[in-house]
Amino acid sequence: MVKTKKIMNERISKAINCSTPDRIPIALRIEYAAASWAKIKFSDFALNPLMASEALEKAYDDIGGWDAVDASWTLGTRWVKSEAAKVEIPGVDFSDEIPHRIIEFPVMKPEDYDVILRKGIYSLLTRMIGRLGRKFDEDIERDIFTSFAPIYKHWIEDRGVSVLRGGMVRPPFVQFSMWRTWRGIANDILSRREKLKEVSDVVWKDLVKIGENQSKIVGCNYVFIPCGRASATFLSEKLFLEYFFPYLKKIVEELVKDGFTPRLHCDADWMPFLEYFLELPKKSCIIELGLETKFKQAKEILGDHICIYGNVPTNLLFAGSPFKVNEYCRKLIEDVGHDGFILANDDIVPYNAKFENVKMLVEAGKKFGKVK
Amino acid sequence: MIKINQMSALEEFFADLDEKLSINEIKKRMKNGEKPEKMLAETKKGLRIVGERFESKQYALIEIEMAEELFKTCVKTIETLSGNKHSNHQDKSADRILEHSDTTDRG
C-alpha cells in the first residue's frame, strides 16, 4: 500500500517535471456525477463536504482507483460561504436534479476599486458578501478551510491520492469580470482602464496570499487558477497582454517561488496564446486545456516546458460508449506521448455521465498509458 | 477589412474602442454645428468595423460587449447635445443584451 501511494505521487511529480513516469497519471474531476452514481441528493453533495467526499470515494473504489482527484467536497460550501457571488443550490433554490448555478450579478460596484486600494481585498470581500446577505471575514474563511482539512488528509495520507486543488487564485481580470460581470468589466476597460490596471497591480499579490493560505490550511500545495475568461474566445491578444497575462505570470512565479504547484484551468480557446505560456517557469505547473485548444498542437508548442492535462470530451462521457472512450484515449495517448501529460476528462465530468464510460477512461489510461 | 484611410476620425476612434476620443470627437463636431445624423451614421459604421474585426479574430467577445456599451454612450451623448431627448433613432441594437454562452469554469 505504501509503495502504491509512492508510485501514484511519483507519477504526478514526473508528469509535472515533464519526465517519463511508469505510466501516464490519470486525474478525474468528478463532481455531481459521483452523487448520481452514489444515489445521494445533489443538495447533500453541494453542502455536506463529508458526504461529497464519501460519494467521490465510492466512485473511486468502484472504478478501480486512479491517481489524482479534485477537491469536489469543497465545492458548494465554498461557493455558498466564501464567494461574493449569487449561487443557487439544488434542492434549495430549484429541483434537486441539476448542479448548483452561479448567477451573473454585479456584486462589485465601480467605486469598489478604490475600496481595494484604501482598505484591501478582505474589506471588499466582506462588503460584497454582506450585500448578498451573508457574513464574511478572514476568520470565517479560515474556519471553512479548516473544516475541509481532515478530508484532504484522508485522501492524501490514508489513500495516497493526489488532490489537485488546495487553494485557488483567480487572476485579477478573471476575478473582476466575475464580480463586475462581463458588461461591467467591458465598461471598466472603456471608462476606467487606468484604475483597473492600478488595482490589478496591487491586488494580484493579495490574491496569491489568499490562495496560498487556503492551500496551507488544507495541506495541499496545488493551487487552482481559473483562466477561461481570458482565453482567445473572450479577449483579443491586445487585451490579453494588457490585462491578463502579465498578472498570470507574476502569480505563477510567486506561487512556484513559494513552493506551490499552479494548476492553470484553461477552458475555451487558447490556441492563439499558447506560446506565451513558455514564459512561465519551466516544469513547474499543470495546464488544463479544453477541447477548443488542439491538444496535439498544444503539446508540440509547449513541449517539455509545461505538463498538459486533459481532455476526454464531456459529451463522450455522457453520450458516448466505452468503445468510443477507449478509442479516444488510445489516439490521445498516441498523439501526445507519455511525458509531461496527465490524462483527464475535459473540465468537469458531467453530472449525467455514464459510469461505464468514466470507468473506461481510467482503464484505457492504465492500458495505453504504460511505458514499455 | 475597411482600411484606416477610408475612415473618419470618429469611425476610427469607435473601431479602436476608444471611449474618450470618440466622445471628444462628437462633442467637438456638435459644437461646430454638424448634423447629429451624420455622427450617428459614422458611429454605426464604427460598430460594423468592430464586427469585421471580430470576424477576422482581431477582436474577441469582450470587444463586442465594449462596442455595445460605447455605442450606447455615443448615442446618448449625441442625443443630449442635440437636445433631442426623444430621438427618432430606431436602431435598437444598443439595447440588445448580449447573451454570452460563457460556460467557462470559474472555480
Image (cartoon, rainbow, N blue to C red):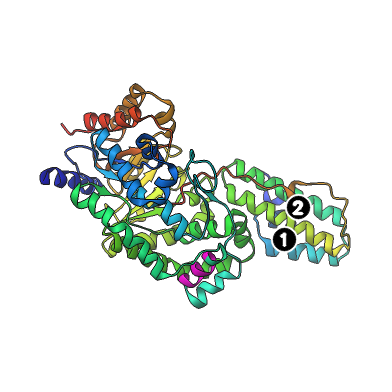
- Residue A125 in the magenta stretch? The answer is yes
Q: Quadrant of residue A261?
A: bottom left
In the picture, measured across the screen, residue A88 lies left or right of residue A316, that is right
Percent position of residue A34, x then y: 36, 39
Percent position of residue A282, x then y: 28, 54
The residue tagged 2 is B43
In the picture, measured across the screen, residue A58 lies left or right of residue B34, that is left
Q: Is the residue marked by circle 2 packed among few (<14), some (14-19), or many (20+) residues within 10 Å?
A: many
At x 37%, y 45%, the residue is A288
Residue B15 makes an appearance in the image: no
Percent position of residue A224, x then y: 37, 54
At x 67%, y 52%, the residue is B67
Vertical position of residue A336 compared to residue A118: above or below? above
Point out the residue furthest to the bottom here. A118
At x 55%, y 63%, the residue is A133
Q: Earlier in the sequence, mark 2 or mark 1?
A: 1
Where does the N terminus of chain A fall, quadrant-wise?
A: top left
Contact? badges 2 and 1 (CB < 8 Å):
yes
Q: Secondary structure at mark 2?
A: helix
Determine which of the numbered discs, if any, sits on residue B22 in the image. 1
Q: Are marks 2 and 1 on the same chain?
A: yes
Q: Amino acid at mark 1?
A: Ser
Q: Chain of mark 1?
A: B
C-alpha span from label 2 to label 1: 9 Å
Q: Which residues are magenta?
A: A121-129
